[in-house]
Amino acid sequence: MKSVLRLLFFLLAAFSAQAHGFEERYDLPVPLAYVIVGACTMVLLTFVVALVFVRRPAGGAVPQATTTPFGLSLSKPAPLHPLLWLPKGLSLLLFALTLIAALYGTSDPLMNLAPTMVWIIGWIGLSFVVIALGNIWPVLDPWRSSFELLNTCAPKLGIQRGLALGWPWPTRLGLWPAAVLLLIWCALEVIYPLATSPFKLGCVLVGWTLINWAGMVCFGREVWQAHADLFAVYFSRLARTFRPCSVASKAAPTSGNIAVILAMLATVLFDGLHGGSAWLVFEGALKALIPQWLDVNGYVAGTLGLLSVWLTFLVAYLLTCQISAGTTSRAVSGTKIAHQMTPTLIPIAAAYLIAHNFSNLLIQGQTIIALLSDPLGRQWDVLGTAKFYPDISVVDAKLTWLVAVTAIVVGHVMSIWQAHRIALSWGLSTCRTALATLPLTALMMAYTAISLVVIAAPMVNDVASNG
């Protein structure tokens, strides 16, 4: 059974940069260039339509949701809301099982529950759910639930004020810890083969648990999770994909928020670039500049590549906002534009996530059915599903390509539409508003073209190249 699953694993999806490719490739009915031009034209048409028909500016800041799609409060500690006991308890149980499997289960990542549960179900699958339903992570967050449980028990242990010390969060630090941690998480997923070693993955989970608890004790759970908890910050941003656009409040913008959202875009794009032909060129050029012994495993090249992609996205966005400010005769500063327009990038981040991981979730995600019966890889069959085999026919290259193109176009169209509504709140003339949003529209068109090229590379054949 192990040999069969191992072979199936490599045929379907590996925990690497090639995780989203297919053995089968889709023959495009038209050249890829036509698809790119069509997608960019759609983005440009959205810009024109918004200028003509949208007259209602974005409203004030939308408060962060404190309820689930079913109306259950997320702001109350778990013990105060009985209806949340079941999902919170189940999440804690699955987290404990995942940790045990990682530390004490088989070293074979194909037979161990931990890699699939963390990377496929917990990271990709939950991201899809958050995009569709809203931020349900506070209910499922095992670190939050465990801390709240310990905090509830603290008075019984003589700690009447609870576990939190209530240190003030450094204002200048802002969200930069979350941004850095998101880049590190991407590096662990794509550059450093953490998913191929369940034990190392388990060590990372233990380390993050200790760091998370320490942060909650020092700064309080709410403050820590709002600024430094990678997953809490990530899912809270991703949940705003379909929320109404809004302008920032009068409060000073949070430092590092732009870096976090640009990291959400850059990390997914880097995952697609890594291992492709363009990456091989970059890696070859880097090896010519540094001694080979400094980067035997490609970790240095991968890290520099990830930082380069993120910095390119960040600099391009900030420069575009400065250009937009110039078109307003500095009536609106580039800094203000950058901060207020940042939420409009979230639909693009969601689109990249869907385009890049759709097939991986549907195919590789099926293995969780068998792994739950034998989480440690000990030939168990607790649930009677250990012999379940994934159905690879549920998705093919054509469907994946159509979903990817649709997601990318829709994401950029939503971004342009929301950006125009925010620009209307600046009180500029129609002409000035058009000029202010035109540079951002050009940037969105560039993002569209780049993302389509990256997504297309491993899965489609261009008819132009086939003669």
Image (spheres, rainbow, N blue to C red):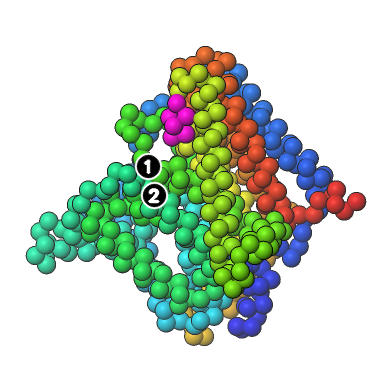
Determine whether, in the image, residue 136 is placed left or right of residue 73.
Answer: right
Which labelled disc corresponds to residue 176?
Answer: 2
Give the residue pinned by disc 1. Answer: 255
Determine whether, in the image, residue 272 is placed left or right of residue 232.
Answer: right
Residue 138 x %, y %: 35, 53
Assign a secondary structure to mark 2: helix
Q: Amino acid at mark 2?
A: Trp
User: Which class describes the residues within 10 Å of circle 1: few (<14), some (14-19), or many (20+)?
Assistant: some
Predominant secondary structure, magenta span: helix
- Residue in the picture at 47% in, 34% down: 338
Residue 412, image quadrant: top right
Rendered view: 224 above or below 120: above
Residue 287 x %, y %: 65, 65
Rendered view: 338 above or below 195: above
Q: Which residue occupies the foreground of this view, 276 or 122?
A: 276
Residue 246, image quadrant: top left
Q: Are marks 2 and 1 in contact (CB under 8 Å)?
A: yes
- Residue in the picture at 42% in, 73% down: 202
Determine whether, in the image, residue 448 is placed left or right of residue 64.
Answer: right
